[in-house]
């Protein structure tokens, strides 16, 4: 790992130089709002590296909200061909939680069935991370995602007068060619550590070590806590749609008017929507809001955690930030933990 120091003007020069060779996307503030979104950079000075969280995660560049993935012709000689659209892309200014989430999806998208569209886009993607400070909704310290150790080429941490930049890969080294940097001083490295210490001070946190989280899910499936927390839920699906680790999608057929061919399209879906678990014969396996909320939590913190050995939640807080009624994973998880501890006491009595 190499640490360099880079000032703000040199960061602008870095973005400008990356724009010569690839599409660069970075956080931009929405006019007049405390909301940010990843957008294509047209002017480096408009990039906002001091932001809390974007509304949609950068996942949208590897797994678009809607994409055509198969083209077919019907008739006497039917044929089909995959549609894979990928281009060189630099994700600039990505937080540790979102880098963690992309790493999670690399695992899920290549397990058993390899998703060729995801893989093609990720292969052409370079990432420049940037560190942040949490707001009241973040819980990355509890989820172990306040730092990441892979999945980026450069990583910037703000210090006085600019950033300390960690050069993590050869691609990162190349990005800095012709960009003025200096060796990071010991005072700047101390500031990086102080920044991390500050980031770890989060009041919004779990009542257990994250590694034990799946254990707390055994025995709580029939708890009343799911109904209590789901009472306020509108089943709008926003929490899934802003989540950097959700990967469910629906598949639609778009037949052309002559009915002799068409395209197959996938669009993001949400397990919190009422019709999500409805099957062709009309039965709905998760008709109640509480069943859908329970499923969402079991999936992120138990099923996928157990399968892949890490939580499928990065603690970014987007779901609670964007939920109309601020349904928050942390108190729900803490209720799960309390309920499981109560059960353990009763069983041990
Ligand atoms: S965003 Fe909130 S209200 Fe909407 S489905 Fe999710 S938890 Fe329910
Ligand atoms: S469940 Fe919420 S906090 Fe966790 S990754 Fe998804 S949006 Fe972020």
Image: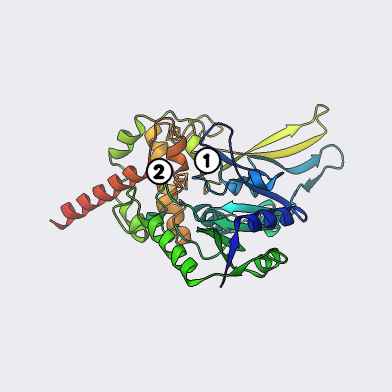
Q: Is residue 340 visible?
A: yes
Is residue 103 left or right of 344 when viewed as pictured? right
Q: Furthest-front residue in view?
A: 161
Q: Categorize mark 2 by other alpha carbons within 10 Å: few (<14), some (14-19), many (20+).
A: many
Is residue 209 left or right of 60 when viewed as pictured? left
Earlier sequence position, callout 1 versus callout 2:
2
- Ligand 2 within 8 Å of disc 2? The answer is yes
From the viewer's side, name the closer residue of 262 and 35.
35
From the viewer's side, name the closer residue of 63 and 321.
321
Q: How many marks?
A: 2
- Ligand 2 within 8 Å of disc 1? The answer is yes
Is residue 7 left or right of 338 when viewed as pictured? right
Which disc number belongs to residue 122? none
- The residue that disc 2 covers is 137
Helix, strand, or loop for circle 2? loop
Spot occupied by residue 18 in the image (x, y as percentages of width and height): 72, 56
Spot occupied by residue 20 in the image (x, y as percentages of width and height): 77, 54
Q: Is residue 115 visible?
A: no
The quadrant where ligand 1 appears is: top left
Helix, strand, or loop for circle 1? loop
Q: Is residue 333 above or below residue 185?
A: above
- The residue that disc 1 covers is 242
Q: Is residue 225 above or below residue 149?
A: above
From the viewer's side, name the closer residue of 318 and 203.
203
Q: Categorize mark 1 by other alpha carbons within 10 Å: few (<14), some (14-19), many (20+).
A: many
Spot occupied by residue 31 in the image (x, y as percentages of width and height): 59, 33
Q: Quadrant of the C terminus?
A: bottom left
Spot occupied by residue 72 in the image (x, y as percentages of width and height): 79, 41
């Amino acid at each position: 790992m190499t640490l360099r120091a880079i000032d703000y003007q040199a960061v602008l020069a870095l973005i400008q130089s990356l724009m010569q060779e690839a599409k660069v996307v970075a956080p931009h503030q929405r006019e007049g709002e405390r909301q940010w979104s990843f957008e294509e950079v047209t002017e480096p000075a408009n990039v906002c590296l001091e932001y809390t969280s974007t509304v949609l995660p950068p996942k949208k560049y590897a797994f678009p909200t809607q994409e055509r993935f198969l083209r077919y012709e019907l008739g006497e000689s039917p044929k089909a061909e995959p549609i894979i659209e990928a281009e060189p892309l630099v994700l600039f200014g990505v937080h540790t939680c979102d880098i963690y989430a992309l790493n999670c999806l690399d695992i899920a998208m290549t397990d058993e069935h390899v998703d060729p569209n995801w893989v093609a886009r990720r292969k052409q993607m370079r990432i420049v991370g940037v560190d942040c400070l949490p707001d009241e909704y973040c819980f990355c310290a509890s989820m172990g995602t306040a730092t990441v150790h892979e999945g980026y080429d450069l990583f910037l941490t703000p210090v006085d007068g600019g950033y300390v930049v960690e050069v993590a890969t050869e691609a990162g080294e190349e990005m800095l060619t012709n960009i003025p940097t200096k060796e990071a001083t010991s005072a700047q490295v101390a500031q990086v550590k102080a920044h991390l210490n500050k980031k770890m001070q989060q009041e919004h946190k779990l009542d257990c070590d994250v590694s034990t989280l799946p254990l707390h899910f055994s025995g709580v499936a029939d708890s009343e806590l799911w109904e209590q927390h789901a009472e306020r839920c509108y089943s709008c699906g926003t929490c899934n749609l802003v989540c950097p680790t959700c990967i469910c999608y629906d598949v639609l057929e778009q037949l052309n008017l002559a009915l002799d061919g068409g395209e197959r399209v996938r669009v993001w879906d949400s397990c919190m929507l009422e019709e999500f678990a409805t099957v062709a014969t009309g039965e709905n396996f998760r008709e109640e809001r509480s069943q859908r909320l329970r499923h969402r939590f079991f999936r992120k913190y138990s099923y996928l955690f157990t399968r892949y050995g890490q939580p499928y939640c990065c603690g970014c807080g987007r779901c609670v930030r964007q939920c109309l009624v601020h349904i928050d994973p942390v108190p729900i998880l803490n209720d799960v933990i309390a309920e499981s501890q109560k059960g353990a006491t009763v069983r041990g009595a």
